[in-house]
């Protein structure tokens, strides 16, 4: 049998694999904790039990939670994404000033030109953008 000490490449490769596995486990642990705290279908006592179980039996606890709650985790994640997208769409609509027609935009640009806030070239660019 080959000793890892006699082949430093294999030793380094094994170290990288173990490091990668540890990082993945940490990521899964954070995901599980985030899902436990995000849940609204269980009370605080059940959340505490899950947290204690995951802390006392780390690898097995994470795997059991992932097996037992995988559908719920996906549903909660999708709901959170949909809520974030809806909030982003509402924000964009409020900032973009939806509902203003090209004629309104040209009139607003003309009033800026008349007040001296913009130059004729800037007015022409705004007019072309509004009419496109």
Image (cartoon, rainbow, N blue to C red):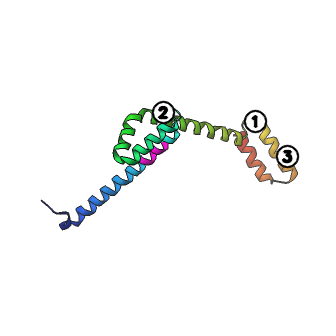
Which residue position holds label 2? 75
Q: CA distance from mark 1 to mark 3?
A: 16 Å
The total of numbered circles placed on residues is 3
Figure check: 120 above or below 4: above
Q: Quadrant of residue 129?
A: top right
| Residue beneath disc 3 | 111
Mark 1 or mark 3: which comes first in sequence? 1
Q: Does the CB distance between marks 3 and 2 fall below 8 Å?
A: no
Q: Position of residue 60 (x, y in %)?
A: 34, 44
- Picture layout, residue 41 above or below residue 3: above
Q: Is label 2 in a helix, a strand or a loop?
A: helix
Q: CA distance from mark 2 to mark 1?
A: 40 Å
Which residue is found at the position 34% from the left and 52% from the top?
21
Position of residue 117 in the picture relative to residue 34 (left or right):
right
Q: What x and y, as percent, mark residue 114?
A: 87, 49
Q: Is residue 56 left or right of residue 99?
A: left
In the rendered image, the quadrant that contains the N terminus is: bottom left
How far apart are labels 3 and 2 at the CA level? Answer: 51 Å
Whichever of callouts 3 and 2 sits on the residue coming sooner in the sequence is: 2
Q: Nearer the viewer, mark 2 or mark 1?
A: 2
Indicate which disc, 2 or 1, sits on the residue closer to the N terminus: 2
Label 1: element kind: loop
Which mark identifies residue 101? 1
Q: Which residues are magenta?
A: 29-34
The residue lying toward the viewer, choosing from 102 and 7, is 7
x 72%, y 37%: residue: 98
């Amino acid at each position: 049998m080959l000793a890892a000490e006699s082949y430093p490449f294999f030793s380094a490769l094994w170290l990288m694999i173990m490091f990668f596995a540890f990082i993945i486990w940490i990521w899964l642990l954070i995901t599980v904790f985030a899902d436990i705290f995000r849940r609204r279908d269980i009370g605080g006592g059940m959340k505490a039990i899950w947290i204690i179980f995951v802390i006392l039996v780390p690898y097995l606890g994470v795997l059991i939670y992932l097996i037992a709650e995988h559908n719920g985790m996906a549903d909660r994640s999708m709901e959170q994404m949909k809520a974030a997208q809806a909030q982003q769409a509402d924000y964009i609509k409020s900032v973009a000033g939806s509902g203003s027609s090209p004629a309104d935009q040209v009139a607003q640009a003309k009033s800026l030109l008349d007040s001296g806030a913009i130059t004729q070239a800037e007015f022409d660019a705004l007019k072309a953008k509004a009419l496109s």
